[in-house]
Image (tube, helix red, strand yellow):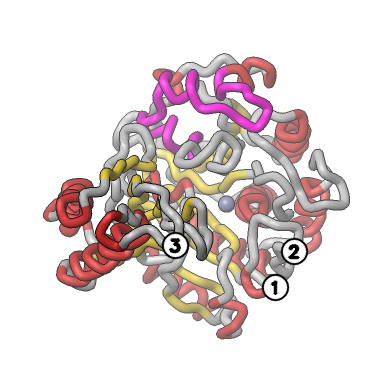
């Protein structure tokens, strides 16, 4: 059995027409008119193959194929079909279409699965739509960490809260109903474009993920005092000197923690940012990545940062402020998302059998799969991103044949794990 390239291409080209910015990339925001159009198309395609179609309490779309086992946990596979503003046609759409095509192939070959299969098509993955840490919403609703508070507070570029945008879309969310019982999902599998240059550069067809790093983000500020370039040195409160000191201390502290964590200050905004004036205010952004669960249990990162800020404050008599950028109901930083190792092995074998080259690749940012790893056995398949791996822009590109190959790997994994 294998997936069909022409259908994958046709699905993706059709989905790309559901954009509010024709000619300038794909813009398909959650709960927009384009979201509705894409959903209608996906429903129509699922109807053609006789799937049982339903939406959960959060508006997530599912197409179910029953198995021989009754009341058995479900195998879910799919991705998201929303996009950022002026994004590309591949991001989550590639994985959504690949999963749809896998279902088609299983249906037309009368494949008999023991465990039930569900195609999952998510419409609210992009964090950019409602601001930092508000993405991967459909999966958070399933695992029960989405909150009413978030629905009522975070806003999109039109000033609508999630709840208001949902209402306009015709959805009254029921978070309780959207929650899945622990143990009710046997596997969660997502194909995604790499959104990085590695596969294309190394000329490899399939990327298999064994884990994705956890993430922590903070914003700090140092409040100095304005002064011109003649201000006596001993009278100054230079926010940039304080910041520089903090950066060095933070770098040393993270290095001491060993190889399970990285951290840096990657962005600074300096006011007034002039060679003629003493820096009055500096805002810096801290990015932390974690590679083991132990490191997040062992280290209180917020306290570590506060201790360093305090020591700089005492040294330079400069006040500071610290804000966390985190998801409601999640730690900061999060631990890494560990994928199901047994299925990684299975997919390596599948790739070998199909003659597709493969590597383990552990790069990546936010995906719904990361939310699912603590809930069920989860796996991801990456396919190459062209144009140096750019993503979330009109230049985002993955060759259709590469998506077909990834879909074949997905197909054979689903066939394998759906048997008892
Ligand atoms: Zn995505």
Residue displayed at 37% across by 41% down = 326
Residue at numbered disc 3? 229
The part of the image, by quadrant, that contains residue 324 is: top left
Query: Horizontal placement of 174 versus 308: left or right?
Result: right
Mark 2 → mark 1, Cα distance in angstroms: 7 Å
Numbered disc 2: secondary structure = loop
The part of the image, by quadrant, that contains residue 156 is: top right
- Sequence-first disc among 1 and 3: 3
Do the numbered discs 2 and 1 sit on residues whose CB atoms are within 8 Å? Answer: yes
Is residue 67 among what the camera can see?
A: no
Query: Horizontal placement of 194 versus 18: left or right?
Result: left
Residue displayed at 43% across by 40% down = 74
Residue at numbered disc 2? 395
Relative to residue 350, is residue 214 depicted above or below? Answer: above
Mark 1 Cα shell of 10 Å, populated few (<14), some (14-19), many (≥20): some
Residue displayed at 77% across by 46% down = 15
Mark 3 Cα shell of 10 Å, populated few (<14), some (14-19), many (≥20): few
Mark 2 Cα shell of 10 Å, populated few (<14), some (14-19), many (≥20): some
- Sequence-first disc among 2 and 1: 1
Is residue 238 among what the camera can see?
A: yes
Along the viewing direction, whichever of 205 and 29 lies nearer the viewer: 29
Residue at numbered disc 1? 387
């Amino acid at each position: 059995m294998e997936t069909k390239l022409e259908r994958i291409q046709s699905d993706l080209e059709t989905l790309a027409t559901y954009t509010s910015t024709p000619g300038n990339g794909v813009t398909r925001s959650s709960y927009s008119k384009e979201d509705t159009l894409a959903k209608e198309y996906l429903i129509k395609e699922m109807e053609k193959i006789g799937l049982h179609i339903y939406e959960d309490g959060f508006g997530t779309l599912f197409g179910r194929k029953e198995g021989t086992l009754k009341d058995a946990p479900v195998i879910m596979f799919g991705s998201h079909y929303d996009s950022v503003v002026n994004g590309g046609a591949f991001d989550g759409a590639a994985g959504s279409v690949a999963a749809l095509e896998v279902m088609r192939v299983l249906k037309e070959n009368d494949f008999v699965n023991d465990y039930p299969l569900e195609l999952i098509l998510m419409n609210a993955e992009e964090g950019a739509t409602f601001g930092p840490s508000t993405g991967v919403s459909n999966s958070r609703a399933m695992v029960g960490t989405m909150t009413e508070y978030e629905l009522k507070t975070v806003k999109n570029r039109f000033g609508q809260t999630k709840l208001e945008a949902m209402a306009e879309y015709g959805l009254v969310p029921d978070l309780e109903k959207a929650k899945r019982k622990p143990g009710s999902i046997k596997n969660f599998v997502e194909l995604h474009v790499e959104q990085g240059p590695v596969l294309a550069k190394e000329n490899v067809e399939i990327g298999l993920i064994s884990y994705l790093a956890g993430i922590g983000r903070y914003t700090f500020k140092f409040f100095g005092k304005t002064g011109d370039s003649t201000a006596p040195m001993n009278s100054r409160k230079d926010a940039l000197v304080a910041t520089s000191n903090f950066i060095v201390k933070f770098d040393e502290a993270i290095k001491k923690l060993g190889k399970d964590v990285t951290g840096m200050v990657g962005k600074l905004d300096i006011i007034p940012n002039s060679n003629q004036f003493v820096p009055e205010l500096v805002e810096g952004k801290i990015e932390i990545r974690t590679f083991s669960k132990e490191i997040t249990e062992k280290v209180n990162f917020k306290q570590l940062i506060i201790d360093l800020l305090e020591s700089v404050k005492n040294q330079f008599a400069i006040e500071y402020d610290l804000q966390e950028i985190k998801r409601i109901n999640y730690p900061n930083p999060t631990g890494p998302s560990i994928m199901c190792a047994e299925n990684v092995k299975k997919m390596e074998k599948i790739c070998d059998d199909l003659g597709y080259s493969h590597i383990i690749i552990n790069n990546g940012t936010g995906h719904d799969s990361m939310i699912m790893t603590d809930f069920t056995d989860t796996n991801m398949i990456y396919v190459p991103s062209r144009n140096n791996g750019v993503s979330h822009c009109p230049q985002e590109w993955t060759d259709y044949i590469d998506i077909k190959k990834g879909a074949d790997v997905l197909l054979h994994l689903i066939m394998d794990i759906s048997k008892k």
